[in-house]
Amino acid sequence: MQPDFAELNRFLLDCPPFDQLAAEQRQWIAGQIKAAYVNEHNVEEFFRSYSPALYIVRSGGFDLLAPDGHLIERLESHDLFGFPSLLSGREVVNQLEVVEDGIIFIVSAADFDRLRQNSRAFELYFIRAHERRLLTETSFSQPPRTSATYPEGAAPAYPQGAAPAGYVDALQRPVGEVVQREAVCLTSTATIQEAAQAMRKEKVSSIMVVDDGRLVGILTDRDLRNRVVAQGLSYDIHINAVMTQAPATIGMTQTLLDALALMTQENIHHIPVVDEDGKPIGMLTNTDLMRQQKSEPVMLISALNKVQDRDALIAEAAHIPDYMHSFAARVNDAAAVGRLLASLTDTMTRKLIDFYEQEHGVAPAAYVWLAFGSQGREDQTLSSDQDNGLLLANDLNEKQLDWFAGLGEFVCQGLADCGVPKCPGDIMASNPDCRRTRAGWLERFESWTRSPTPKALMYCQIFFDSRNVRGNKRLYQAYREDVAKLGRSEFFLGNLARLQSRVQVPLGLFNRFRGTESGKDSDWVDIKRFGIALINDIVRLYSLHEGLTEPRTLIRLQLLESSKLLNRKDNQALAEAWQFMTQLRLQHQLAVWGTDQPKNALDPDELSTLTRRQLKSAFRIVKESQQGVGLKFGRIG
Amino acid sequence: MSAFIDRWKTALQHYWQRRRSLQKAWRQHRYIALDLETSGLDPRSDQILAMGWVVIEPPIIDYQQAHYFVTQAQPDLKQSPVVHGLVQRDFVDATPPEQALERLATMLEGAVLVCHHVQFDWKFLQQLAKQHQIKLQPLAKFDTLTYEAARLRQQQHHIARGSLTLAACRERFGLPNYEAHHAYSDAVACGELFLAQAYQYAGSSSASLQELLAKAK
């Protein structure tokens, strides 16, 4: 007599899609299951002997790895795996790694098929899950992380000298590779009806308006609804009356992540893609993005965008660290992680501003919400704190100033509740000192540039890496150009260069590491302060000198390629050192996740030989660049 | 006389076979994890109410070869319903105990009996076997409780009261907590614990059954 399998039944009821099976079916499958106790000693044999099959994790923890070693999924109790091979009939290629010993249930291929035939819900569940899995597997099938278990013998993801090849995440593909459809163009004197007909004929949701080969506007189906039908306009009117003029555009070589950021920033669904001369190439829509990757970055940003109130935002933001952990583990390019985090912080900031406006009315005057520091440079990490401020229109009255004071308080507190720590140096819009008019900010900068104490210099560097997160573009542009002008003061640059050259790169005699920390971890090396931040500082100095307004370090370096002061070789070396150290820091942060170990300092002895060597050469590059900066700028003033 | 010699020969052969068998890697053996429900603690006066077992071929526990028998049509329940949730109506479908025992005897041939506190279950089984003249000849017996006690002692642990219950032992190996207490689910629970213990002891080595058994002595 077979037992009633009450325990197993209860478990399956809690384990979709088995909960969808009829009671007899579930009872039947319970009696067919094999349970295996899987541990590191038998995992290979287990996987070899019992596949293909559907596996259900009952206890323990397991990592499912692709053939190239990248982590597809961390499996825990109630997780299912193995079904893609069952559905596709392809050979099982993934590997299983034991994190914690446990019990895995095996449902044989024959039994799995029988359940699928008997239950439509069961079948559908796996078909959908399979599609999702395919997407994530293919989009992350680029170069593997050498090891997920840093610091035990890990190497950095790319060898010395070579910049990271390819892009791991589909969001890093250039826009030009993705935009398929040729632009559907009309001239601005076409009628609304002609536009609608063209949209129908071409099956598109938007039209580019082009006069003399130059993009002058776009018209979307949303515009037809909101600006034509809802307004009761005649269909014979020219489209230039209802189109969006001078729309935001994106270049072919920019990445999908840039496009995504732009879409969320501007709250638009269509972005015209243009070539270097501004000639329209095609239209990129949010569906194109979704199609490219139903990945979590997109999902996460759109989930944040959908929340209706502050509490919901905080609840959604609570998922970010876990999510970033798994995203970072799959992505080869640490810069992508920084960019994604920055765009998440941007999105949260904008949502909080919206909530504040819902309660206190819209902004009483033009303003810009400024992001400084790592958010501005888009190299945020999970331990980065807030650096922000407000740029205000001139001549505000008391009441208007109060509105902005309230905004600063509300948003900074909100961000803190969403997990972005407050700035210990109080560089936040909640601080009256960081809410200034254009003239006010300039006054501030001037005082720093004129009488630069080391502390003032340290601080003011943060302010030079700024971005407009929300607000008036013209106001920001004017401000940014003023700041750039001030930054070109040779006297000021000289002081910055001298400040930077005082920072000791942690390489000692005979090229040994010199510890930067105090206490028991005194041999440890802080790769942020003495590596990444120093490169940021050096690159900023060149950028200030050239009058660049771009805040991102790698893009700054690209823009500096034509600079006479920084030769191509040094430029490339700096970019590589920055990428290497950012990657190393990311791996380190993943490894010490959830512990109170330092987030930016690591023990060189724990590194693999190769990584240690690479870190040394990265520091050497920093040291040489530092000396170069001292020579080029330090003597002046 | 020759019958007598033959008997000796068979016995000797059996002995050698068993010895050889014990030398084989533990993983190549078959195990029967078993649990009984009884009406009390004394094998001479109390009855087996139900028995459940699963077959283990490391690392697999095959639910298709799981068995559960209620063996008493007219049980003397005393206080035990509280313990294992058996009530009068469960006994309607009872299997005659000798039938269940015969199935078990077949399964146990060449296999290792695994229980949590094997002496207890074994005494009850022996008692019943004697009554029905059935021979139970497992290759060996493994006690998950003794193994655990020895393991803890070796780690210099103070063995606190209650730390050797099946649930407590399972928890130390990170095995899930089962709600149902019932001869069958306890047999599964014991079987899983056995696998965890055996793999912990043997790792990827090909430790023999004999070596493994020595750890539970």
Image (cartoon, rainbow, N blue to C red):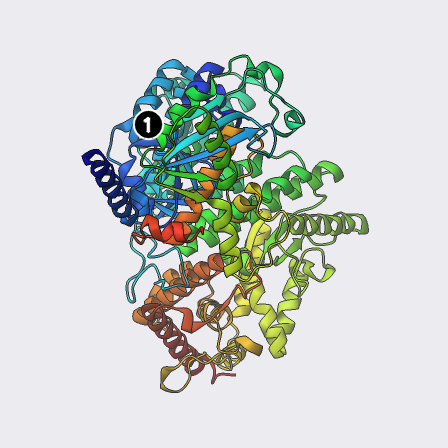
Residue, far right: A398
* Residue B208: x %, y % from top left: 31, 51
Query: Hey, which residue is sitting farthest left in the picture?
Result: B2
Q: Quadrant of residue A542?
A: bottom left
Left of B155 or right of it: where is A412? right
- Res B178 visible: yes
Nearer to me, A258 or A277: A258
Residue A575: % across, % down = 37, 64
For image coordinates 38% across by 32% down, the residue present is: B136
Reply above or below: A3 against B144: above
Q: Nearer the viewer, residue A452 or B192?
A: B192
Categorize mark 1 by other alpha carbons within 10 Å: few (<14), some (14-19), many (20+). Answer: many
Q: Chain of mark 1?
A: A
Question: Which quarter of the picture shows residue A566?
Answer: bottom left
In the rendered image, which quarter contains the N terminus of chain A?
top left
x and y, in percent, of residue A597 in the image = 55, 65
On screen, residue A631 above or below B194: below
Q: Examine the rendered structure and indicate whether residue A445 appears above or below residue A341.
A: below
User: Tag 1's secondary structure?
Assistant: strand
The reply to whether residue A216 is in sight is no
Instruction: Report the label total.
Output: 1
Residue indicated by mark 1: A108
- Of B146 and A432, nearer the camera is B146
**The image quarter in which residue A111 lies:** top left
Q: Is residue A158 left or right of residue B173?
A: left
Q: Position of residue A199 (x, y in %)?
A: 39, 21
Q: Residue furthest front?
A: B1
Task: Give amino acid for label 1.
Answer: Ser
Residue drawn at x 63%, y 40% is: A315
